[in-house]
Amino acid sequence: MSKKELKTNACRILDKEKINYQLNTYDCKQFIDGCHIADALGQSYEQSFKTLVCQGKSKNYFVFAIPVDKELDLKKSAKAVGEKSVELIAVKDINKVTGYIRGGCTPLGMKKLYTTVIEKSALGQEKIIISGGRLGLQIIIAPQDLAKVTDATFDELI
């Protein structure tokens, strides 16, 4: 696979913004949860982040990035985005809302720039690992750089 084939919307955005990142590829034909991927690749759960999309009472969508082994606290997440409550969107709606498929969803390059919040524990990491925008592709990036390019904030989400 050529370097050009690896470029996703997420990568193109990072390149355009001159953000420093690394790509990591692995063999993956179907969705595998983040913990299994981290285990297979010898990556720490604290560094490996999953992207979750919620909808608030306002009907607005929100993006949350949390460590792969943690569960999103919906009350804390709602508070972080100023909503009364938020609920995870259905798996069948991921592509419609984000433009990505399950397992390839990343805060970068979604159909719209949704309000994004990164779990504050990311600030304790020099680099975090997020999906690269398709199965089998990861982006390794400084949490502050991810926040900069997605206009994200950091808050307690777990």
Image (cartoon, rainbow, N blue to C red):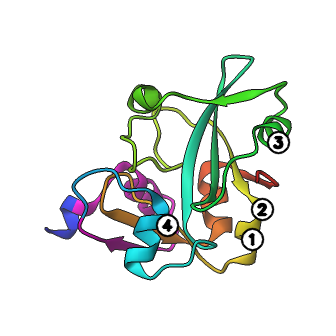
Q: Nearer the viewer, mark 4 or mark 1?
A: 1
Marks 3 and 4, how far apart at CA:
28 Å
Quarter assignment of residue 12: bottom left
Amino acid type, residue under disc 4 in the picture: Lys
Q: Secondary structure at mark 4?
A: loop
Which span is picked out in magenta?
A: 6-27
Q: Secondary structure at mark 2?
A: helix
Taking 97 as reference, is 121 left or right? right
Q: Determine the residue positioned at 46% across, 72% down.
A: 38
Q: Earlier in the sequence, mark 2 or mark 3?
A: 3
Depth order, front residue of 140/12: 140
Amino acid type, residue under disc 3 in the picture: Ala
Q: Determine the residue positioned at 50% across, 73% down.
A: 20
Question: Is residue 23 within the magenta segment?
Answer: yes
Density class for disc 3 (Cα within 10 Å; few <14, some 14-19, many ≥20) is: some
Q: Which residue is mark 4?
A: 18
Q: Which residue is mark 1?
A: 123
- Give me the disc on residue 10: none
Taking 116 as reference, is 121 left or right? right
Marks 1 and 2, how far apart at CA:
6 Å
Q: Secondary structure at mark 1?
A: helix
Amino acid type, residue under disc 2 in the picture: Lys
Quarter assignment of residue 143: bottom right
Q: Which residue is mark 3?
A: 80
Depth order, front residue of 61/21: 61
